[in-house]
Amino acid sequence: MTHPTGRPEAVAPATALRAAAPGWATEADVVVVGSGVAGLTVALRCAAAGARVTVVTKARLDDGSTRWAQGGIAAALGEGDTPEQHLDDTLVAGAGLCDERAVRTLVTEGPDAVRRLIATGARFDADDDTGEILLTREGGHHRRRIAHAGGDATGAEISRALVEAVREAGIDTVENALVLDLLKNGSGRAAGVTLHVMGEGRRDGVGAVRAGAVVLATGGMGQIFSATTNPAVSTGDGVALALRAGAEVSDLEFVQFHPTVLWLGPEAEGQQPLVSEAVRGEGAHLVDADGVRFMRGQHELAELAPRDIVAKGITRRMQERGAEHMYLDARHFGARMWERRFPTILAACRAHGIDPVTEPIPVAPAAHYASGGVRTDLHGRTTVPGLYACGEVACTGVHGANRLASNSLLEGLVFAERIAEDITAGAAGAAGAAGAEGPARPATAAERPGPDEGAPGGAPLLASEARYEIQHIMTHGAGVLRSAESLARAADRLERVHDEAAAQLRRDGKTAEPGVETWEATNLHLVARVLVAAALRREETRGCHWREDRPARDDAAWRRHLLVTLGPDGALDVRSTDSEAFPPPTTPRTETESRP
């Protein structure tokens, strides 16, 4: 099939989500999905090179995960610090699974990338007299190398600067839009995305953006757990889209649980306020109800050990004491330091009836960051031609089995610039919509994002209430501490959630009504299945993956990566690499080729 222009028709994969056929379509050279530091950096760099860019974002342009980042951005900017030292700390935190080439790229290109971010308009906290950027420490870092803004509002400042730059550049944006699936041309190359624009959006309903390069920068998947630091929009949409499109994901079992999240009670669900690691970096202590500093003796850095060690230390102490939380004590900071250095955290605590100036803060671990994701090379290319990924949705090999604190904003920045360079140097956009006009046009039937919403075949959509069942299953079966028993139970319960929906579809020809909540629940379920399958396969403890029944790290058998793909029938293919080397993405298989 071809357009009147002679270009190959775009089609969605057979595994695509159920949705109505797109009622409109528009053209671009590059479509970027996500509006955090990674997505907006790609958009700005591509636009500066002359590409027509469309940014699609699930909420407002400034509502991505980046704005919630409190701690800062890590880079070797201070006197005496070097990229080599930053590399060493990152490799240690990654527990033997970092791709050293990717880490070296991060730490060597990072300082200049931060300087370019400053040139874009981001303002970091600086010394009043010298003007030099103020740097602090966080867990796992042996140097002060964390640049911050507004005390504890670094992400908000970075987001502000990039959003202003995007608006000044006149880049096309589609807000309040949930991306559905990847479109491909006849040769299997990315050709755009389908999306649903919600109530406040510029265009109503399901539509399509055709482009020769698609960049996923959709952020995390923390909403698969009951308690998370991630915003409500972090439902794993990018990873789910990539899987349905035939791309490989890697290392999804390595979910980092932030050790110190404000504990709001046993019934609290969804996004929880983060108490930044920078608070510990400035000297706060973790204590139990008796005031005992229990992290002493567990690691040379005590409270500043890598996050997985601190999260496990807190969880173990909670189990030992039969407690639902521990405490972070920073009363010795005094009111002035709290107000100047951590105003956002101070306000959040006081809003929930806790005053850190006069009392310890109740804290407990919560899902925070996905170290794995859509597998990419050093230029952000996935195993699907024309599809790129960066930021938390991607697995570049930088984080290994556990992300080093404040490396995430830097990773998004550095690899976003590399993606933009690759797209513009290779003129990837020219293969897609070059020569087409920008205004929206009616979509063709072939741009249907999946089985028609009334069709009986294909995979079912899950009801919106399945979201809460999935979160409960994952929290209890695949949380901070895991075992073969808990993971097997989680896998079985996740399978039942799908089987019940599939049985109704076969029996009655009915499935949940297509819509944002059912699409999100279906995405969460797919991502949860992959995480549990990988966690079951990895029979060891490594980084932020802790198996109670396999407490030792086993380099001989498991210093390697797990790769997962989704078959056309919905089955997962989980396989291991031969060594710890993070393999470059290979030439992908098309939908017509068989999968092992």
Image (cartoon, rainbow, N blue to C red):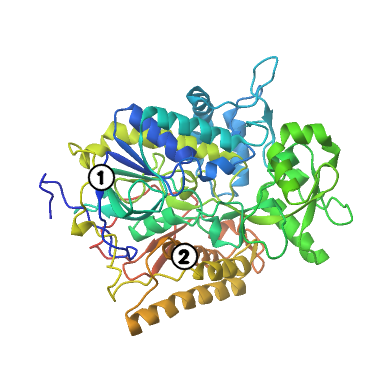
In this view, which residue lies farthest toward the front? 200
In this view, which residue lies farthest toward the bottom? 507
- Between 102 and 43, the one lying in front of the other is 43
- Between 252 and 240, the one lying in front of the other is 240
- SS assignment at label 1: strand
**Quadrant (top left, top right, bottom left, bottom right) of the C terminus:** bottom left
> From this viewpoint, is residue 80 visible?
yes
Q: State the image quarter where residue 222 is shown.
A: bottom right
Q: Sequence-wise, which precedes: disc 1 or disc 2?
A: 1
Q: State the image quarter where residue 61 is shown.
A: top left
- SS assignment at label 2: helix
In this view, which residue lies farthest toward the top? 129
Check disc 1 and report the residue beneath it.
26
Q: Position of residue 438 (x, y in %)?
A: 23, 39
Q: Is residue 307 left or right of residue 59?
A: right
Check disc 2 and report the residue beneath it.
521
Q: Position of residue 262 (x, y in %)?
A: 71, 52
Q: Is residue 538 above or below residue 498?
A: above
Q: Residues within 10 Å of mark 1 (few under 14, many from 20)?
A: many
Disc on res. 87: none
Disc 1 marks a residue whose amino acid type is: Thr
Q: Is residue 588 above or below residue 572?
A: above
**Quadrant (top left, top right, bottom left, bottom right) of the N terminus:** bottom left
